[in-house]
Image: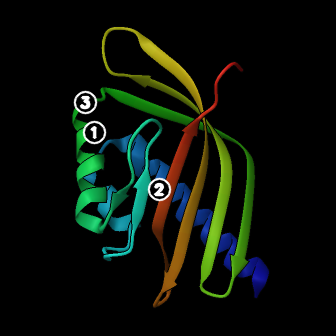
Amino acid sequence: MLAQRIEEVTKANERFYEAFESLDIARMDQVWAHLEYVTCVHPGWALRSKWSEVRDSWVLIFNNTFSMRFALSDVTIQVAGDIAWVLCVEHITSQQSDEPQEGTVIATNLFERIGDEWLMIHHHGSAVMGQ
């Protein structure tokens, strides 16, 4: 049972990064729980609370980014009942102007099992400096 839930959360986390890379808000809408208690912290940003604010942050990022690619490392997944968390290092290549930019972010992604699907309830990314 635990192995099955870890596999389900792995797939939910993959869907999150696929939505992120697609820069498609409709795809991002599908991976998040649309609830009042969802939260998000992008690197260097203030906390966004409630689905409407979280969604607005993704719209802003997607509207100002030409491309985004992730390579994940150090992925750890834990499941406790209907809550799961993923810790990982995001190696990001993005383009917001003429020159691609590379960065490293350590991320925490929280998921809640709602019905029979795992939906994101929190994403927190912190830039890793000096690597």
Q: Residues within 10 Å of mark 1 (few under 14, many from 20)?
A: some
Q: Amino acid at mark 3?
A: Asn
Q: Amino acid at mark 2?
A: Phe
Q: Which mark is residue 81?
A: none
Name the residue carrying label 2. Answer: 16
- Tell me whether circle 1 and circle 3 mark residues in contact (CB < 8 Å): yes
Residue at the image point whose x is 44% and y is 44% from the top: 42
Could you tell me residue 121's position as x and y percent? 45, 69
Q: CA distance from mark 2 to mark 1?
A: 14 Å
Q: Amino acid at mark 1?
A: Phe
Q: Residues within 10 Å of mark 2 (few under 14, many from 20)?
A: many
Residue at the image point whose x is 60% and y is 86% from the top: 82
Name the residue carrying label 1. Answer: 62
Judge left or right: residue 103 versus residue 20: right
| Above/below status of 117 relative to 69 | below
- Tell me whether circle 2 and circle 1 mark residues in contact (CB < 8 Å): no
- Which image quadrant: the C terminus? top right
Among the two numbered marks 2 and 3 on one chain, the one whose residue lies closer to the N terminus? 2
Judge left or right: residue 35 versus residue 80: left
Could you tell me residue 92's position as x and y percent? 54, 30
Q: Is residue 75 visible?
A: yes
Name the residue carrying label 3. Answer: 64
